[in-house]
Image (cartoon, helix red, strand yellow):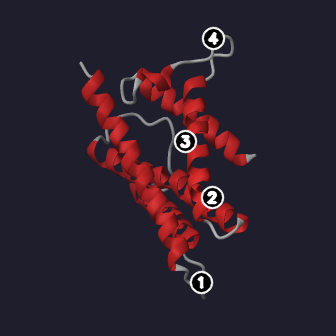
């Protein structure tokens, strides 16, 4: 159930990015009545189905399929948080005069401590999605990492394609 809400948020983000020209326009189409990101949801469903079918042929069993896809999708959802915390620190350093609606206890030092702490927890979670202490399965780790890399490459490719095609 939690993945459904994350996916709904990701679909909304994709629709907004498409409206801004950062993704192809097909992601921007909203449902006529409910104004939900219908096209993004359909694309998500198609991609998810293709991934599950392809990996279903490669997985040893249903448990392997579930945990590999769970780890892969969890890492994909965690990676933007690393960038977000880094951007938070960068924006505070290059643009300190901008009023901020939220205050971090401890000023800049506190911001650095909290951001680094959050980034370390995220990195720890990513590592533990790939590696279980006491055991290492190269096939499992490779499957997860390849899935993450393919997702990043395709996502960045879509962004670059939209920027070239729909910019200006």
Secondary structure state at the residue bearing disc 3? helix
Say which label, 1 or 3, has the lower sequence index: 3
Relative to 112, 168 lies left or right: left
Q: Residues within 10 Å of mark 1 (few under 14, many from 20)?
A: few
| Callout 2–callout 4 Cβ contact below 8 Å | no
Give the residue at the far bottom of this rendering. Answer: 134
List the residue tagged with mark 2. Answer: 56
Question: What's the CA distance linking mark 2 and mark 1?
Answer: 26 Å
Residue 32, disc:
4
Looking at the image, is mark 4 or mark 1 nearer the viewer?
4
Compared to 50, does 34 lie above or below? above
Query: Looking at the picture, how far across and down is residue 151, in whole percent?
Result: 45, 50
Q: Quadrant of residue 167?
A: top left
Query: Looking at the picture, how far across and down is residue 27, in whole percent?
Result: 49, 26
Residue 116 in view here: no
List the residue tagged with mark 1. Answer: 133
Q: Quadrant of residue 34?
A: top right
Secondary structure state at the residue bearing disc 2? helix
């Amino acid at each position: 159930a939690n993945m459904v809400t994350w996916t709904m948020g990701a679909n909304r983000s994709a629709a907004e990015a498409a409206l801004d020209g950062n993704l192809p326009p097909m992601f921007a189409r909203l449902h006529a009545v409910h104004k939900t990101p219908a096209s993004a949801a359909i694309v998500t469903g198609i991609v998810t189905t293709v991934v599950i079918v392809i990996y279903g042929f490669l997985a040893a069993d249903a448990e392997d399929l579930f945990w590999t896809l769970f780890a892969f999708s969890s890492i994909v959802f965690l990676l933007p948080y690393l960038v977000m915390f880094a951007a938070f620190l960068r924006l505070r350093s290059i643009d300190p005069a901008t009023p901020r609606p939220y205050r971090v206890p401890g000023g800049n030092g506190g911001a650095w401590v909290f951001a680094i702490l959050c980034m370390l927890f995220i990195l720890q979670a990513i590592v533990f999605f790939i590696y279980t202490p006491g055991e290492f399965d190269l096939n499992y780790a490779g499957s997860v990492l390849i899935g993450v890399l393919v997702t990043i490459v395709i996502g960045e490719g879509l962004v670059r394609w939209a920027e070239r095609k729909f910019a200006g």
